[in-house]
Image (cartoon, helix red, strand yellow):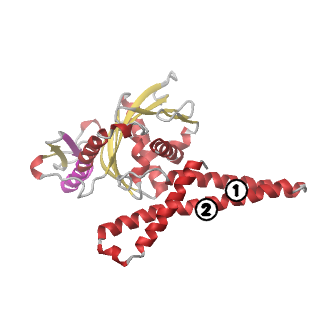
Amino acid sequence: MAELIADRLQEIQARHQELERTMSDPDLHKDQKRAVETMREHARLSAIVEAWERYQHQVQELSDNRELLEQESDEELQAMAQEEVDRLEARVADTERELKLLLVPPDPLDAKNTIMEIRAGTGGDEASLFAADLYRMYTRYAETQGWKIEIMDRNETEVGGFKEITFSISGNAVYSQLKYESGVHRVQRIPSTESSGRIHTSAVTVAVLPEAEETDVEIRSEDIKIDVFRSSGPGGQSVNTTDSAVRITHHPSGLVVICQDEKSQLKNKAKALRVLKARVFDLEDSKRKEQEAEARKNQVGSGDRSERIRTYNFPQNRLTDHRINLTLYKLDSIIQGALAEVIDTLRLSAGEAAQ
């Protein structure tokens, strides 16, 4: 492991010990805010210290086994020793990767839940079908993480795709993993309706918004206009006989949110307000980030919705993330939700750039 990272880990160990002394002080809990912040930092550093100690133990064990391998003359015992060295090398590599992820500088929004919006762009029906593919990909990845998905609103097409779909994902550190998914996702594949076998290129836009909590943003009743209307399905046909769909217009920002997924007007209104709060919060956060222009140069992309971030090439079974020049020839498994390698590589790249 790089000397710079080792030095940083020693500093973290010292800070961790300092926090443990602070936590043993009975006066700490007289200041609730300080107590919560101290315990939160202690928990984060504890994970790093535990992984660092595990890494050091594994490195020592690997070194001992390499020495045994060099000294062993019996071929059968040599093969067994080599097998153990290979196993330990894999464990050391895994722990080193875990440590690097734990060392990524925390973003104050990382612990938040998210609201994701997927919209079909250029490509007609094929774009809407790919929007549905991306929704399934994120849903399956969320299931592997033990996260909960809730559809806020969707606009389906007659071919089984989505013109757009909005959904929330809640769980542990959701935003920290999904925040780099914002941008334009391009797909290259042969549509099922294409008889000549010609590859089509379509695009879908993904927005990942940190879900606002009650104290994060205030939506004043005098700043919004609420309209109700009948919800519609694919092709525009009415799917409800009551005015259950809700449109909220936020005058200060100009944002408009529509929710019609529920049969209840009250439920649609509640969901629309959640989406509106997330969009307003995201707008305010974007302004904050723009003020930190120098720091943003080191980020893995700006999160700009118009930025083409990734290409999914189905004929070649290839995924390419253009921000970090990552190419993987396992699109078939990634589109089924095996996103961990892509997400971890993005997080590591962002962490390395910020350090």
Q: Label 1: few (<14), some or many (≥20) within 10 Å? A: some
Q: Label 2: few (<14), some or many (≥20) within 10 Å? A: some
Amino acid type assigned to the residue bearing label 1 in the image: Leu
Q: Is residue 57 left or right of residue 254?
A: right
Residue 213 rendering spot, x and y as whole percentages: 27, 57
| Whether residue 260 is visible | no
Magenta-drawn stretch contains 266? yes
Label 1 or label 2, whichever comes before in sequence order: 2
Magenta-drawn stretch contains 103? no
Q: Is residue 249 left or right of residue 44?
A: left
**Quadrant of residue 215 in the image?**
bottom left
- Tell which of 175 and 334 is nearer to you: 175
| Whether residue 117 is visible | yes
Residue displayed at 53% across by 56% down: 9
Identify residue for label 1: 88
Question: Up-down: is 149 above or below 255?
Answer: below
Residue 190 rendering spot, x and y as whole percentages: 49, 28
Residue displayed at 79% across by 53% down: 82
Q: Is residue 219 left or right of residue 128?
A: left
**Quadrant of residue 60 in the image?**
bottom right
Identify residue for label 2: 54
Q: How many marks?
A: 2
- Tell which of 20 and 46 is nearer to you: 20
Range shown magenta: 255-276
